[in-house]
Amino acid sequence: MKHLAAYLLLGLAGNTSPSGDDIKEVLSSVGIEAEDDRLALLLKELEGKDINELIKEGTEKLASVPSGGAGGAPAAAAAPAAGGAAAPAESAAPAEEKKEDKEESDEDMGFGLFD
């Protein structure tokens, strides 16, 4: 990915066909050592191809990939309908967790990792 990112950066800067040395220079400017075998493979795969056309084709392919997230909604809606007795027990659990969090924060004497 780092080699491809450097290739794309060079393309944005106007270099439409970056060489291996160009990519190595970009990577070394941020302290990353280029891997010659991966770099050679990337350049071989992209040789003679327009990067903008490849991005367009990839975007079209990604558009057909389902991106879920809707599968969890019915299960969440079914949980409260399962029974009224379960709801009070669930609401009591977060209160207990809050007490434990308070106690844990006392142990570090008010200092957190990101304070």
Image: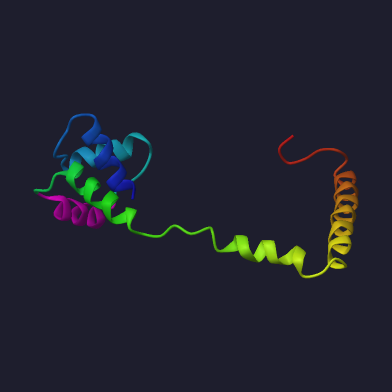
Q: Split into 4 quadrants, where in the image is the C terminus?
A: top right
Decide whether residue 45 is among the magenta residues: yes
**Looking at the picture, does residue 60 appear above or below residue 6?**
below
Q: Closest to the observer: 90 or 107?
A: 90
User: Start and end of the magenta stretch?
Assistant: 35-47
Direction from residue 84 to residue 33 in the image, left or right: left
Expressed as whole percent of the image width and height from the top left, the position of residue 2 reads 33, 47
**Looking at the picture, does residue 80 appear above or below residue 9?**
below
- Residue at 89% x, 53% y is 95
Expressed as whole percent of the image width and height from the top left, the position of residue 84 reads 85, 66
- Residue at 86% x, 50% y is 98
Looking at the rendering, which quadrant does residue 38 occupy? bottom left
- Residue at 89% x, 46% y is 102
- Residue at 73% x, 66% y is 79
Looking at the rendering, which quadrant does residue 64 occupy? bottom left
- Does residue 104 appear in this view? yes
Q: Residue furthest top?
A: 13
Direction from residue 33 to residue 18 in the image, left or right: left
Q: Residue furthest bottom?
A: 82
Q: Main secondary structure of the magenta part?
A: helix
Expressed as whole percent of the image width and height from the top left, the position of residue 21 reads 19, 41
Looking at the rendering, which quadrant does residue 10 occupy? top left
Expressed as whole percent of the image width and height from the top left, the position of residue 11 reads 21, 35
- Does residue 20 appear in this view? no
